[in-house]
Amino acid sequence: MTNPFKGTGTALVTPFKSDGAIDVDALKKFIEFQIQENVDFLVVQGTTGESPTLSWEEKMEILDIVAEVNAKRKPIVFGLGGNNTAEIAKKMGQLPSSVDGILSVSPYYNKPIQKGIVEHFKYVASHTDLPIILYNVPGRTASNMSIETTLELAEVPNIVAVKEASGNMEQIMDIIRQRPEGFGVLSGDDPLVLPLAAAGADGVISVVSNSFPKDFSNMVRWTATDKHAEAKAIHYNLFEITKLFFAQGNPGGVKEALKQMNLMENHMRMPLVNVSDDLAKAIYTETARINKH
């Protein structure tokens, strides 16, 4: 199976009301904004969507809303991973037809060895016909998927890509160099998208594109079509805001920008909390500059 997910996929935030309930109206408005700004695909319930704080029922509600607004205009990737292999496999068989692919994080906390990671993904992949994007994010899982593990899993027919957030450029380029034909490599680190795209990566699953979907998507497209000067200009135009968004964790920074853009309020669920007043002011200043650019 060839990777169908290329370009820019937005790791969608989840809008909340002040009482912690899902803000349905804001979510609908936000999804339409993403589609109109022409991102390539939508990622529902990644970590940026505060998935650890949402129940399965809430996740299905959000997925249904996104699918309704999207109306098949963009592919939908649903985040479904964890460290309970049997439970993840069971849920993969329960996903609705609106889902076009699955983003599945490497098991966290129980820290399996590489063989355990391989067996986990082979097992869950056998319980769905949907294409699966592996997600390697050692900063959250406390274990790194090695080059050899990723390449072994790339031979599983419905494992079609990896979202690489190890930050290890050498590792990622080695995967790009050795991957089988049709297997995708997506950046999981917004600051590294330009160099990785230039090195042959197929795109990104992005946090920054929540706020600046058009600019971010153009940067990735233009790199792929050798418009390097134009892509580099966007990269550096977004460079400071990218640092600000991650200064106090994700998605606090990007939600602050989305509030300033009148797309939603900046409420989060504990244990996450809002960014400091100083950081909010810096984000406001930089967001205003970019939107005038």
Image: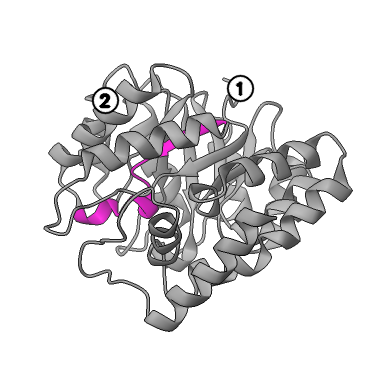
Q: Which label was assigned to residue 2?
A: 1
Tell how many labels. 2
In front of the other: 120 or 286: 286
Residue drawn at x 31%, y 64% is 109
Q: Which quadrant would residue 101 be assigned to in this image?
A: top left
Q: Where is residue 64 in the image (x, y as percent from the top left)?
A: 25, 27
Q: Name the residue located 28 percent from the left edge and 72 percent from the top edge.
A: 273
Q: Quadrant of the N terminus?
A: top right
Q: Give x and y (percent) for residue 248.
A: 43, 75
Question: Can you say whether 261 is above or below 270 in the image?
Answer: above
Asked which quadrant contains residue 287, the reply is: bottom right
In this view of the protein, can residue 78 be seen by the observer?
no
| Quarter the C terminus occupies | bottom right
Q: Nearer the viewer, residue 242 or 192?
A: 242
Q: Indicate which disc residue 176 carries.
A: none
User: Residue at the bottom extreme?
Assistant: 278
Q: Nearer the viewer, mark 2 or mark 1?
A: 2
Disc 1 is placed on an element classified as loop
* Helix, strand or loop for disc 2: loop
Residue that badge 2 annotates: 95
Residue 198 percent coordinates (x, y) = 81, 47
Residue 97 can be seen in this image: yes
Question: Is 129 included in the stretch rendered in magenta?
Answer: no
Q: What residue is shown at x 54% (from left), y 48% (from top)?
A: 209
Report the front residue among 117 and 89: 89
Toward the viewer: 226 or 184?
226
Q: Give the range drawn in magenta.
A: 40-53
**Type of amino acid at the residue the image marks with label 2:** Leu
Disc 1 residue crowd, few under 14, some 14–19, many 20+, Cα 10 Å: some
Q: Which residue is drawn at 42% across and 31% down?
A: 32
